[in-house]
Image: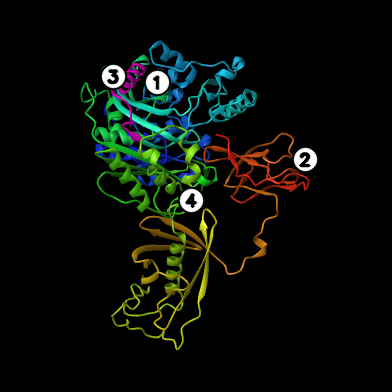
């Protein structure tokens, strides 16, 4: 059957990516969207779109019946699930086929067999795929620690816990089961040995209905936070040929064991000694599939569509790989604050373009990042002849990007790519556990003081006293101070008898909160100049661009202002400042002990017995918030009495909302206010 109209049962970046291939193949595209996504990029890019009433995933993208009805209403003849949501739901795949539509995915039976990690491991053992020995939590002893608890029906880090002490095992089992039941509707949890410093290595497979199975090389996805991937690359570096061959053969055996068809990924944990162990098989396209596409010169979505139409793969053997590719996931989150997801208007999103660079995104500048879905903004991919070149290209592209709006992990990505351990391919899943503090140090390799000076000079030119002269462009003044040996530029209406007194401007650096005070003055020429900043000279100053000579080096800054936020983009870093009033408003202070919502979200539960008047201990989890697919715990800032409780299960809260107040017991030992901690 030839596919003519395809509905993508997904949203955001993956929907846009599938639509791109459909346009190349002449296939009409259909989007589905929730009320929260009414103006989303994937809706704007689709040929047709069907509304799924509501905003929460459970009411929209997870409603298979509504998606099938949307496909019928739009006249689609095929459905592509993307990844996440219903992509690995066997019942949904069956419903699509029962409706007479082509399912662009693996057979229903294969999805069912791999849906439960416990059943999948039993099947893989029979196929000769290497496995970690399961551990019975009821009989686990000290010699079997540490243990990894995992949700049998889940992924993405939900329901996953590392247990290092036997005394903590019962509580962690209950917590993992509760989270698994909430996330997947199945509370089954299993345990296996936790491999310290293991690498996450996976193999992309592609299979057709004509008995051809391709193993499309390896990918390393070891750099993870919250058990979710951050940076991926292909091929996985540092593997010897024997290990690569073993991984390829195991992946093909896994695919054949379940009669697989289409694109899938077999994931392995590779120990420090180089021993591979099967983790799971993802019966769908992976987020990181672009690195494999780049290395093999393939379009995996086009191959999925070809296989779904019943056609064979182009050849019995896959093409030869070429070069190296690296992908970084750009998230709206704050790594320095326990990876808290961020929301708000994405004011600017501009990535450099050039050979070897690719951007997959579901956003453009002006879109809004909401609370209902994953906080990933984009995937940035670089491909080059060698790993060193690909890593360098990706780091520089991220560094040069202009991203204004919510806090992102962009600086973390750049520093990760340039970290000595990453450069040397010393990779394992504990990378961020060891290096997060240094990678999120706000002072590392940055010069916010000079950036704040550039912002101040731009504002001085933009202000009511801006000089209007022959260099004004579109009503905005560009001031070029007198160059040594040259005549002063002509000025009209801004001459002063005496130099002005210095003026001061205060900024708060975001997100670390550091304050900067900048002094400047405007002398007779009318050109603003730094005050008390030796070694710095202004070469050009305009409302949106400032060029400074700092200790003999010329540096360029682009300045963009949105309300009280000022974004300064330099060649080597980007900065966000909040302009501060000259004097602090006492009314903005919060009462000591106040627990504020760190992000918009939904209160999902409270600590047992929590009510005004109860006694709490420092660090005790009090309130659980769910936001952007993750749960976050709000901890007691000190030991004392809960004097107010404004949160209740089901409440929707905005960032900064007062959830509760803890009055500290003076007799208790003071502790620093902890950052809200994520449970997943």
Q: Residue at x 35, y 18 (%)?
A: 250
Find the distance from the CA under tag 1 to the CA under tag 4.
Answer: 39 Å
Location of residue 446 (image quadrant): bottom left
Q: Is residue 237 magenta?
A: yes
Q: Is residue 194 above or below residue 444?
A: above
Do residues under tags 4 and 3 come within 8 Å of each other at their CB atoms?
Answer: no
In the rendered image, which residue does mark 2 sit on? 614
| Residue 171 x, y percent position in the rendering | 64, 26
Residue neighbourhood size for the residue with mark 4, other residues' Cα within 10 Å, grouped as few (<14), some (14–19), many (≥20): many
Find the distance from the CA under tag 3 to the CA under tag 2.
Answer: 64 Å
In the rendered image, which residue does mark 3 sit on? 209
Q: How many marks?
A: 4
Location of residue 316 (image quadrant): top left
- Select label 3 or label 1 by which is in front: 1
Do residues under tags 1 and 4 come within 8 Å of each other at their CB atoms?
Answer: no
Point out the tag, 4 or 2, that comes first from the N-terminus. 4
């Amino acid at each position: 059957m030839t596919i003519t109209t395809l509905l993508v049962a997904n949203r955001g970046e993956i929907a846009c990516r599938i639509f791109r291939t459909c346009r190349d193949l002449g296939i009409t595209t259909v989007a589905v969207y929730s009320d929260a996504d009414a103006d989303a990029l994937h809706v704007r890019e689709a040929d047709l779109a069907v509304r799924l009433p509501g905003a929460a995933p459970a009411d929209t993208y997870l409603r298979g019946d509504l998606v099938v009805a949307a496909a019928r209403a739009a006249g689609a003849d095929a459905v592509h699930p993307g990844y996440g949501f219903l992509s690995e739901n066997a019942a949904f795949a069956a419903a699509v086929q029962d409706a007479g539509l082509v399912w662009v995915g693996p057979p229903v039976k294969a999805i069912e067999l791999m849906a439960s990690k416990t059943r999948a491991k039993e099947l893989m053992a029979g196929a000769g795929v290497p496995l970690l020995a399961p551990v019975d939590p009821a009989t686990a002893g000290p010699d079997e620690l540490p243990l990894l608890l995992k949700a049998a029906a889940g992924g993405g880090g939900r329901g996953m816990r590392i247990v290092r002490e036997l005394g903590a095992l019962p509580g962690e089992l209950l917590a993992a089961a509760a989270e698994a039941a909430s996330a997947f509707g199945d509370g089954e949890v299993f345990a296996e040995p936790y491999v310290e410093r293991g690498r996450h290595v996976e193999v992309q497979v592609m299979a057709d209905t004509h008995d051809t199975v391709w193993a499309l090389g390896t990918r390393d996805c070891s750099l993870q936070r919250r058990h979710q991937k951050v940076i991926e690359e292909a091929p996985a570096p540092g593997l010897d040929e024997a290990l690569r061959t073993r991984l390829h053969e195991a992946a093909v055996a896994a695919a054949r064991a379940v009669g697989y068809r289409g694109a899938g990924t077999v994931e392995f944990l590779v120990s420090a000694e180089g021993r591979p162990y099967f983790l799971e098989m993802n019966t769908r396209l992976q987020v990181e599939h672009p690195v494999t596409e780049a290395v093999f010169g393939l379009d995996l979505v086009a191959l999925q569509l070809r296989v779904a139409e019943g056609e064979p793969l182009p050849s019995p053997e896959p093409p030869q790989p070429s070069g190296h590719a690296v992908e970084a996931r750009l998230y709206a989150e704050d790594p320095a604050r326990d990876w808290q997801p961020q929301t708000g208007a994405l004011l600017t999103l501009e990535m450099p373009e050039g050979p070897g660079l690719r951007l997959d995104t579901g956003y453009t500048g002006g879109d809004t990042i909401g609370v209902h879905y994953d906080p990933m903004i984009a995937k940035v991919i670089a491909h080059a002849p060698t790993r060193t070149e690909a890593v360098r290209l990706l780091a520089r592209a991220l560094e040069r990007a202009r991203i204004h709006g919510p806090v992102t992990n962009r600086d973390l990505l750049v520093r990760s790519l340039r970290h000595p351990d990453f450069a040397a391919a010393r990779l394992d899943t504990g990378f961020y556990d060891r290096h997060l503090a240094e990678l999120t140090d706000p002072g590392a390799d940055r010069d916010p003081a000079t950036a704040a000076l550039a912002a101040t000079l731009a504002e001085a030119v933009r202000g009511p006293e801006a000089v209007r002269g022959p260099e004004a462009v579109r009503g905005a003044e560009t001031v070029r101070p007198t160059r040594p040996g040259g005549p002063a530029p002509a000025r009209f209406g801004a001459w002063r008898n005496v130099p002005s007194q210095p003026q001061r401007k205060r900024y708060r650096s975001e997100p670390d909160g550091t304050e900067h005070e900048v002094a400047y003055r405007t002398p007779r020429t009318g050109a603003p100049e730094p005050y008390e900043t030796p070694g710095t000279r202004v070469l050009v100053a305009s409302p949106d661009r400032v060029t400074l000579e700092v200790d003999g080096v010329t540096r360029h800054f682009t300045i963009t202002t949105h309300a009280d936020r000022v974004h300064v983009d330099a060649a080597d870093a980007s900065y966000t400042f909040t302009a501060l009033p000259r004097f602090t408003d006492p009314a903005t202070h919060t009462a000591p002990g106040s627990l504020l919502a760190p992000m918009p979200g939904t209160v999902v539960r409270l600590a047992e017995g929590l009510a005004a008047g109860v006694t709490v201990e420092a660090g005790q989890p009090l309130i659980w918030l769910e936001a952007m697919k993750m749960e976050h715990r709000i901890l007691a800032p000190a030991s004392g009495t809960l004097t107010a409780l404004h949160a209740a299960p089901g409440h929707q809260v905005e960032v900064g909302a007062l959830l509760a107040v803890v009055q500290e017991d003076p007799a208790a030992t003071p502790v620093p206010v902890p950052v809200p901690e994520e449970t997943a």
